[in-house]
Image (cartoon, rainbow, N blue to C red):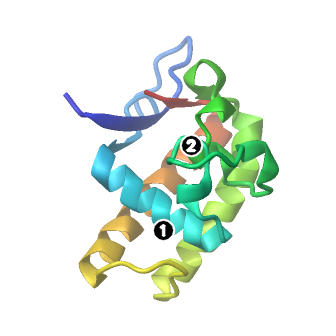
């Protein structure tokens, strides 16, 4: 059993062998490192934010990546496919920069490589949500 978070394409009424098992799994430490690097890309100090030890509310932050940090963005653990589009676009921009070695945040080289693979997985999952019209589910 994974202690962390799993992002997956919501299962539809009809079985879909291609998308039903597509997911990105994270242990808590790995997820936190990933969130720190993403937050750096958006200029967000996570330690100041609600849910990360601070008291600054997420509704004060303007970023398409807010659902990646704010659990309240996932009512019932799901983000509808249309709401995934701006997240997907921004994550693809970051993915392109990371492939070129341009990280806004700091981490060891091995960690950056690992987080690049994590971001690639997340982009594939969110892209599949948009393609299928299914929600992004977080467990």
Question: Which residue is at a point 54% across and 41% down the rendered structure image?
Answer: 51
* Residue 52 placement, left or right of 118: right
Q: Quadrant of residue 25?
A: top left
Q: Quadrant of residue 40?
A: bottom right
Residue 23 vs residue 33, the one in the foreground = 33
Question: How many C-alpha atoms fall within 10 Å of the one at disc 1: few (<14), some, or many (≥20)?
Answer: some
Q: Is residue 103 shown above or below 114?
A: below
Q: Secondary structure at mark 1?
A: helix
Mark 1 vs mark 2, foreground winner is 1
Question: How many C-alpha atoms fall within 10 Å of the one at disc 2: few (<14), some, or many (≥20)?
Answer: many
Residue 134 can be seen, yes or no: no
Could you say which disc has been placed on residue 57 in the image?
none
Cα separation between marks 1 and 2: 23 Å
Pointer 2 residue: 128
Pointer 1 residue: 37
Residue 119 can be seen, yes or no: yes
* Residue 105 placement, left or right of 94: left
Q: Secondary structure at mark 2?
A: helix
Image x and y of residue 126, in percent: 57, 46
Image x and y of residue 131, in percent: 65, 41
Residue 134 vs residue 75, the one in the foreground = 75
Q: Quadrant of the N terminus?
A: top left
Image x and y of residue 13, in percent: 56, 11
Question: Which residue is at a point 58% across and 49% down the rendered structure image?
Answer: 54
Q: Is residue 54 shown above or below 73?
A: below
């Amino acid at each position: 059993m994974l202690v962390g978070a799993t992002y997956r394409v919501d299962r539809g009424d009809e079985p879909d062998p291609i998308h039903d098992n597509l997911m990105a799994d994270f242990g808590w430490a790995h997820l936190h490192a990933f969130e720190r690097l993403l937050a750096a890309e958006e200029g967000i100090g996570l330690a100041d934010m609600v849910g990360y030890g601070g008291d600054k509310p997420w509704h004060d932050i303007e970023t398409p990546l807010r659902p990646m940090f704010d659990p309240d963005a996932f009512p019932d653990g799901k983000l509808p496919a249309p709401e995934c589009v701006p997240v997907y676009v921004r994550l693809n921009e970051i993915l392109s920069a990371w492939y070129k070695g341009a990280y806004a945040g700091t981490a060891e080289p091995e960690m950056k490589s690992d987080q690049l693979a994590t971001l690639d997985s997340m982009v594939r999952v969110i892209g599949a949500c948009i393609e299928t019209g299914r929600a992004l589910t977080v467990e």
